[in-house]
Image (cartoon, rainbow, N blue to C red):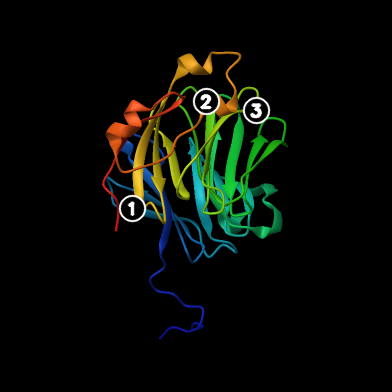
Amino acid sequence: EYDFDEESFNPFPKVICNKFINSDDKNLKFVSSTTNGDLLLYDVNSGYTDIIIKNYDSPVYTFDILNEVIFMGEESGRIEVLDIRESHANNKNIYYLYSHPGKNEVCKTVYSKNNNYVLSGGNDNNAIIFDFRNYKILKSISHKGAIKGLSINTNENYLVTGGGNKDKMIKLWDLKKVKQISETKANSQITALEFINNSTIFTSFGYNENMSAVYNLDYDELDKENCSVMQLCNISLSNSVQSELNDMKDIFNKQDEFERHY
C-alpha cells in the first residue's frame, strides 16, 4: 500500500525534451526531461535508466549537452547547469546562470563550444547570449513574439533566431561580433530552426502555415560589405516552390518546401 497525494501524483508524465549525449554506438546514451520535473539518463545498449534529477521544482523544457554537462532551460525561466559526472544527490551539483525576465518559459537552449556561449530563447520574446567563460550576459536579442527557434551553424560563427505568431521574423546574427546581419519576414510563426550544416537551415512553421521549409545561406552575399539588411532579406512564403526559386535574390534562399501538416 502506497501513501501519496492523489492531486499531485502523475503516473504517466509527459516527455518534454530528448537529446543524445554522444554518437558512439557502443556507449549510446540519451537524456530525457519530463513534466513532473525528472531528468532521466538512458543507456540504449543495456536498457538501464538512471534518475539524474527527481521531482525538481521546475520542469526542464529544453537543454543542451557538452560532454556530460547539461545546460538546462526551465519552465520558470531559469538557465542552470548540471554536471552529471558528479554525485547528484539532493541536486547539489545544479547551479544557476541567469533567468529570462518575468519567469517566462525557456523554449530553446544551445551551447557554443567554440565561443563558450550559452544561448537561450524564451516566451519573454528574448534570446540571450551568455558568456560562460566570463559569467556575464553579452546580449539580449529581441523579437515581438516567443523565440522557439534558435540554432547555430557547424562552424559556430552564425546564429539564427525565429519569432512567434506576433513576430514571424527570421533573424541571422554574426556570433563572433554579436551583431545582426539580416532578417526576413515569414507568413507564420516560427516554431523551430535548425542548422543542418554551415549554410542549410531547416525551418518549421506553425499556425497558419503548418509547414516546413529549407533555406540556404548565400555566403557571397554575406561577404558584401555594402549589403544592407533589406537587400539581404525579402522573402514571401508561398505554396509554389518554382516561383520562390525564380525570385531568390537574398541570403535566405529557399531550397525546398515540404508537404503541409494538417
Q: Which mark is residue 48?
A: 1
Is 151 rendered above or below residue 220? Answer: below
Q: Is residue 41 visible to us here? A: yes
Instruction: Name the residue that disc number 2 marks.
Output: 232
Q: CA distance from mark 2 to mark 3?
A: 18 Å
Between residue 115 and residue 225, name the one nearer to us: 225
Q: Secondary structure at mark 1?
A: loop
- Please state the horizontal and vertical placement of residue 56, each as a whole percent of the image: 56, 62
The quarter of the picture where the C terminus appears is: bottom left
Q: Is residue 212 left or right of residue 17?
A: left
Of marks 1 and 3, which one's residue comes earlier in the chain? 1
Q: Residue flagged by tag 1: what amino acid is it?
A: Tyr
Of labels 1 and 3, the one closer to you: 3
Image quarter of residue 103: bottom right
Q: Is residue 25 left or right of residue 189?
A: left
Q: Which mark is residue 178?
A: 3
Of marks 1 and 2, which one's residue comes earlier in the chain? 1
Image quarter of residue 207: bottom left
Q: Residue visible at 59% across and 39% down?
A: 119
Q: Secondary structure at mark 2?
A: helix
- Please state the horizontal and vertical placement of residue 185, each as a whole percent of the image: 51, 40
Q: Residue visible at 47% across and 64% down?
A: 35
Dots 1, 3 in contact, CB < 8 A: no
